[in-house]
Image (tube, helix red, strand yellow):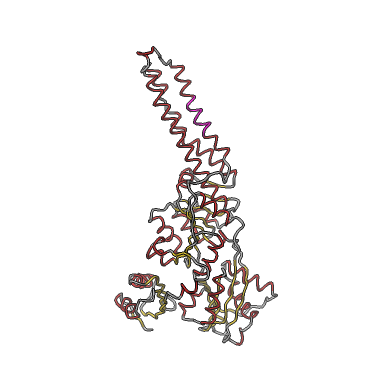
Amino acid sequence: MSISVLVISCPCALGLATPVAIMVATGQGARHGILIKSGEALEDAGSLSSVVFDKTGTLTAGKPEVTEIVAAEAGEEAFNTEEELLVLAATLEELSEHPLAGAILRAAGARGLKDRIPLEHFEAVPGRGVKGVLKDGRTVYIGSGNYMKELGIRDQDLEDQAGHLASEGRTILFLALDHKLLGLIGATDRLKPGSIGAVDRLHKLGIRVIMMTGDRQATAEAIGRELGGVQVIAEVLPTDKAEVISRLRQKGDRVAMVGDGINDAPALAVADVGIAIGAGSDIAIESADIVLVRNELNDAVTAIELSRKTLRTIKENLFWAFFYNVIAIPVAAGVFYVPYGLKLSPMIGALAMSFSSIFVVLNALRLRGFKPGKEGGRRKLIQETSSLRVDDLITAGITDRACPVIPGLEEEEGTMDKEMVLEVEGMTCGHCTARVEKALKAIPGVSGAHADLETKRVTVKTDGNVSLEAVTQAVTDDGYHVVG
């Protein structure tokens, strides 16, 4: 009888319950073009509550096309036509690796504009744009509206046109010569064919979808409406992506990050599950837990569905293994021998033990019949498109400041905010700019602050109720001097 108990209690089924299911699921993922690097990643994907997508190259094709070129009415005589602006932009963007640089070069090539302006110096400004010095000593700036504001370069007519184009989903690049705006270039990047379908499938699984982009808020909102029901986090600098993921995780969310670029790598590493597009950069693929070999966004959803089915199979295996031991061990110990004369021989015990292991393996093999799209959540998530600036996320949190996007009201909402541009002396390094930004963000009513070390300018975003005196005092108290 003791030998029967020893044979029956062998925990083979318990030992096989998890690894066999993970092994079969990993192989099934490979069949669907999904490379799962570890069992831990496979398990974590089943408990996600939010999925964050990078926009450019992930949700969109990553090949933007120039759609508009607008010259300023009071621009320079040498750059007052579309062709002249395009040649100037191509001169600088030829040295840039940004996707928008490719759009400008393709537009110039389509018009047969092969001439370039002699350039003395070129510099990329991460998250802002590019700058260059021409042979005649004049400085050219190309970049976002925030970059121009930081430089103190404004043109109300161009900014109004930019706002209108942004509401239609255009990404805007401003061109400036010295401290005068020359015009703007609008570009659009089409969504990948599977993007909208992937968002809908995630909602069916009860998962919230977030789009993270460096575009201005109005542009991001337009793309968010096209996707249908996503949380938009706009104006995110490449260096802020990992911080966004960290903030979401601090709220208790289980977060997956889906990206493809070099600047997505830190966010992929910080997320609970990092998912990289197979055609992306090597460092992004190295940082990710899951790689989508076929470059299909729907495969990211398939990975989550496979994970959930795998977890359910593991729980079924563990239940059977425990149930078997709970029933079989007392029988082998002779609990029915006294009343009924039933006794379990060691040979039958060995057969029962083997059957339990076979059952666990066969149950795990059921994963080979997994089909994408068959998995569903308890209740489909109904998510409205809402918008949030990255500064608001960092200062207040995603649920506190996110506001619904109502078509046609972007410009009205934008007028509620107020920006101040200060010239600050005493900033000599990145540590100094960080101190100034921290001091300003501590002021009630300030939603964001950015200090530019090169220009010595600090851009402060407020709700309109913060006085210049309060901002100046905060900078002064931190040991720096406001000169303008």
Q: Quadrant of residue 94?
A: bottom right
Q: Is residue 126 visible?
A: no
Residue 460, position as x, y percentages in the image = 40, 75
Q: Is residue 135 above or below residue 387?
A: below
Q: Is residue 35 above or below residue 466?
A: above
Horizontally, residue 110 falls left or right of residue 6, namely right
Outermost residue toward the right?
Answer: 112
Q: Is residue 252 above or below residue 55?
A: above
Horizontally, residue 440 falls left or right of residue 86, namely left
Quadrant (top left/top right/bottom left/bottom right) for the C terminus: bottom left
Outermost residue toward the left?
Answer: 477
Start-end of magenta stretch: 355-363
Along the viewing direction, whichever of 277 and 389 lies nearer the viewer? 389
Residue 446, position as x, y percentages in the image = 37, 72
Q: Residue at x 40, y 14 (%)?
A: 343
Magenta part, dominant SS: helix
Horizontally, residue 7 falls left or right of residue 68, namely left
Quadrant (top left/top right/bottom left/bottom right) for the N terminus: top left
Q: Is residue 435 above or below residue 325?
A: below
Along the viewing direction, whichever of 396 and 41 lies nearer the viewer? 396
Along the viewing direction, whichever of 346 and 314 lies nearer the viewer? 314
Q: Is residue 374 magenta?
A: no
Along the viewing direction, whichever of 413 and 181 lies nearer the viewer? 413
Q: Residue at x 60, y 76 (%)?
A: 89
Q: Residue at x 43, y 51 (%)?
A: 254
Q: Residue at x 39, y 19 (%)?
A: 332
Q: How many marks?
A: 0
Residue 217, position as x, y percentages in the image = 49, 69
Q: Is residue 357 magenta?
A: yes
Q: Is residue 261 visible?
A: yes
